[in-house]
C-alpha cells in the first residue's frame, strides 16, 4: 500500500469489504517500521509478534465488517497504558512493570478494530517541546537536523515518515499540535471532557487531552470519533458561511513570529475568504501574566514526578518539578475564569479563529535532555508559543499543513480554534483548507 491507500479510512474500508486481510495491513506497517525507523527513532517498542497475532484474531471477529478502524495499524504515545507493556513516559525513573489493562482510549481504539503496532518516543514525562529519550534523538522526517517537536514527537515522526497511517498523541501544552505542525500533519486537541484524559496524576490540572495525529482531515475525524465514543464526529459537514478571525500577533513579548509562519496563517485565511467566509483581523486576549499557565505546567509535572526516584530523573525535569512545588499555590480557578470570559467576548464576533501554529520552524534535533532547564524553556517558548492558551481554557484546536518553509524545508501550519463543542466546526474548516491548499501527506523518505 502506498499513497492514498495508506490512510486509516482507506485501510478500514478495504478490510471491511474483504479486499484486504488485517494481517497484511499490519505486516505492511511493520515492514515500513523495520525499514525506516533506524533513521528517525520514532518508536521505543515495536509489537511485532503481538500485533501480528492480534491482526489474525481480528480477522475472525464476527463484527469485522462494521468496525470503523478495522485492521488499521496505529502507534500509541508512551504516556498511556498499553496492556503488556511498561508505560515509560520517556524516563529512566518509571516502572518497568508491564501494564495489566489498556488506557480507556487505547481500549476504544482496539475495540474499533485498530491494531497497536508500537509505542512512540516522548521527552521525559512529556514536559518538553523536542523529543529525545535516554537512548535516541528522534528526528523530523522532513529535515533530520530538526526535531519533530514534542511531546508527541515519536508519534508525529512515525506518521510523517509513512511508517503508520495514524497515531495517538496527548496534548498538555500543544503536544499534539506542535509536532503535527513540525511534521506536516493534521493534529487535533479536543475540548475538555470530549475524550477520556486520565493522563498522569490529574492531567496537568485539566490541561491535557488525548487526540489523533494523521495525514488527512478525514482520518482525524475518524479517530476522534472513536476516541470520543461519538460516531457522528466522523462525518465532516459543510461549514457553511462562517465569521473567521485571523490573529498573527505573538502571544508573548519575547517572541518574534517568523514572517513565513505569519504569511501562512494570513494566506489560509485569505483562501477561506475567497471561498465565501467573512474574514477579519482578530485580537486575541493573550494573558499578560503567564503564571496560571506556568503553575499548572510545572505543578502537574511535580505531581507526576512525586512517585519517582528523583535521582533517576533528568536535571531539567527535577528543576521543572521543583518549581512546580513552589508554584502550586497559584493553581486557582480565578485567572482562568477571567481569561475564558475574555475569550468568550472575543469569540462573540467570530465562529473560529486562525493563528500560526508555531512562531518558527522546529528547533534542532539535539540531546535536549542533557541541556539546562532554562535553555529548554527558552527554546520551546520561542518556537511554540501559540498552542498552550487553548489547553489552559480547555477549548478545541486543530492544526493543518500550510506550505513549506523555504529555509528549513519543514512544513508550515495553521491552527484553527473554536469555543467548547466546536470540534465538528474546526474539522469542517480544516477539511475546506485541505481542498483549497492540498498538502504533501508524508515526507520523502
Image (cartoon, rainbow, N blue to C red):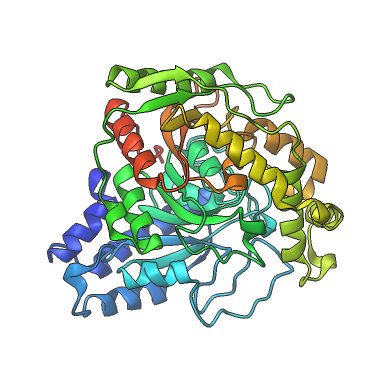
Q: Is residue 127 above or below residue 433?
A: below
Seen at 62% across and 49% down, the residue is: 131
Q: Position of residue 367 (x, y in %)?
A: 71, 46
Residue 340 shows in the view: yes
Which image quadrant for residue 201? Answer: bottom right
Seen at 76% across and 56% down, the residue is: 299
Residue 145 shows in the view: no
Q: Is residue 84 above or below residue 236?
A: below
How many callouts does the rendering have?
0
Front one among 37 and 339: 339
Front one among 412 and 224: 224
Viewed as shown, does residue 180 lie left or right of 30? right
Q: Position of residue 185 (x, y in %)?
A: 42, 41
Seen at 47% across and 31% down, the residue is: 348
Q: Position of residue 52 (x, y in %)?
A: 34, 73
Viewed as shown, does residue 170 lie left or right of 127? left
Seen at 53% across and 43% down, the residue is: 179
Q: Quarter of the image containing the C terminus?
A: top left
Q: Is residue 108 above or below residue 210?
A: below
Amino acid at each position: 500500500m502506498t499513497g492514498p491507500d495508506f490512510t486509516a479510512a482507506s485501510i478500514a474500508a478495504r478490510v471491511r469489504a474483504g479486499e484486504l486481510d488485517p494481517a497484511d495491513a499490519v505486516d505492511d506497517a511493520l515492514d515500513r517500521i523495520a525499514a525506516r525507523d533506524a533513521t528517525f527513532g520514532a518508536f521505543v517498542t515495536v509489537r511485532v509478534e503481538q500485533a501480528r497475532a492480534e491482526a489474525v484474531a481480528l480477522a475472525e471477529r464476527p463484527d469485522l465488517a462494521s468496525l470503523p478502524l478495522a485492521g488499521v495499524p496505529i502507534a500509541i504515545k508512551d504516556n498511556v497504558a498499553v496492556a503488556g507493556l511498561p508505560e515509560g513516559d520517556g524516563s529512566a525513573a518509571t516502572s518497568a512493570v508491564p501494564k495489566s489493562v489498556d488506557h480507556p482510549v487505547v481500549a476504544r481504539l482496539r475495540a474499533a478494530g485498530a491494531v497497536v503496532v508500537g509505542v512512540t518516543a516522548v521527552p521525559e514525562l512529556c514536559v518538553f517541546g523536542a523529543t529525545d529519550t535516554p537512548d535516541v534523538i528522534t528526528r523530523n522526517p522532513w529535515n533530520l537536523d530538526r526535531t519533530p517537536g514534542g511531546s508527541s514527537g515519536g508519534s508525529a515522526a512515525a506518521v510523517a515518515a509513512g511508517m503508520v497511517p495514524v497515531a495517538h498523541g496527548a496534548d498538555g501544552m500543544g503536544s499534539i499540535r506542535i509536532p503535527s505542525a513540525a511534521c506536516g500533519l493534521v493534529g487535533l486537541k479536543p475540548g475538555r471532557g470530549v475524550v477520556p484524559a486520565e493522563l498522569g496524576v490529574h492531567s496537568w490540572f485539566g490541561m491535557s487531552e488525548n487526540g489523533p495525529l494523521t495525514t488527512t482531515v478525514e482520518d482525524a475525524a475518524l479517530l476522534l470519533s472513536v476516541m470520543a465514543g461519538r460516531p457522528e464526529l466522523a462525518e465532516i459537514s459543510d461549514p457553511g458561511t462562517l465569521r473567521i478571525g485571523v490573529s498573527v500577533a505573538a502571544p508573548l513579548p519575547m517572541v518574534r513570529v517568523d514572517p513565513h509562519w505569519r504569511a501562512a496563517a494570513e494566506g489560509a485565511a485569505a483562501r477561506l475568504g475567497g471561498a465565501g467566509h467573512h474574514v477579519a483581523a482578530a485580537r486575541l486576549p493573550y494573558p499578560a501574566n503567564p503564571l496560571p499557565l506556568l503553575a499548572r505546567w510545572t505543578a502537574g509535572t511535580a505531581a507526576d514526578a512525586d512517585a519517582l526516584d528523583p535521582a533517576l530523573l533528568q536535571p531539567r525535569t527535577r528543576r521543572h518539578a521543583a518549581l512546580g512545588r513552589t508554584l502550586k499555590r497559584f493553581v486557582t480557578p480565578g485567572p482562568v475564569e477571567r481569561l475564558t470570559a475574555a475569550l468568550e467576548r472575543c469569540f462573540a464576533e467570530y465562529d473560529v479563529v486562525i493563528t500560526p501554529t508555531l512562531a518558527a520552524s522546529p528547533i534542532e534535533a539535539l540531546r535536549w535532555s542533557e541541556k539546562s532547564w532554562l535553555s529548554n524553556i527558552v527554546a520551546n517558548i520561542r518556537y511554540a508559543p501559540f498552542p498552550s492558551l487553548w489547553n489552559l481554557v480547555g477549548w478545541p484546536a486543530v492544526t493543518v499543513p500550510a506550505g513549506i518553509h523555504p529555509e528549513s524545508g519543514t512544513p508550515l501550519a495553521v491552527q484553527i480554534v473554536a469555543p467548547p463543542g466546536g470540534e465538528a466546526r474546526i474539522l469542517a474548516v480544516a477539511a475546506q483548507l485541505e481542498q483549497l491548499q492540498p498538502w504533501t501527506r508524508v515526507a520523502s523518505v
